[in-house]
Amino acid sequence: MGEAKRRKTTQGETYGQETRILPWVPITKTQAEQFVSWTTRGAWIGIGLMVVGWATIRFIGPAFGWWQVVS
């Protein structure tokens, strides 16, 4: 308990608050991690949609006679 009290008196008002990435950027490390997580998930969803679209254009459409692929 002594260490916690010492840390609280040393840090003052900032005790218990999350640290920022940079002092002048109002984004915490947790928010940055969440942003990376969401954008990574979005990128994988986009890649999956692109593969589905490519398969539809290249294989599914011509198989059902919707269009012809010109090589």
Image (cartoon, helix red, strand yellow):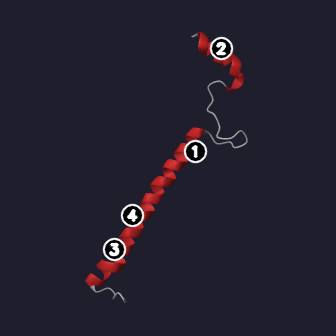
- Kindly indicate the quadrant of the structure image that contains residue 9: top right
The residue shown at (65%, 14%) is: 6
Using the image, tell me which numbered label, if any, was put on residue 24: none
Residue holding disc 2:
6
* Above or below for 61 versus 12: below
Q: Distance between the residues labelled 4 and 3?
A: 11 Å
Indicate the amino acid at tag 2: Arg
Q: How would you rate the neighbour count of disc 1 (Cα within 10 Å): few for under 14, some for 14-19, many for 20 or more?
A: few
Q: Is mark 1 on a helix, strand or loop?
A: helix
Q: Few, some or many C-alpha atoms within 10 Å of disc 4 (few <14, some 14-19, many ≥20)?
A: few
Which residue is under mark 1?
32
Marks 1/2 in contact by CB < 8 Å: the verdict is no
The amino acid type, in three-letter code, at marker 4 is Gly
Residue situated furthest front in the rendering = 71
Q: How far apart are marks 3 and 1 (CA)?
A: 35 Å
Q: Mark 4 points at which residue?
A: 48
Where does residue 43 sit, x and y in percent of width and height?
47, 59
The reply to whether discs 4 and 3 touch (Cβ–Cβ < 8 Å) is no
On screen, residue 62 above or below 24: below
Ranked by sequence position, the earlier of labels 4 and 2 is: 2
Q: What residue sits right under mark 3 in the picture? A: 55
User: Which comes sooner in the sequence, label 3 or label 1?
Assistant: 1
* Residue type beneath disc 1: Ala
Residue type at mark 3 is Ala
Q: N-terminal of the two: label 2 or label 3? A: 2
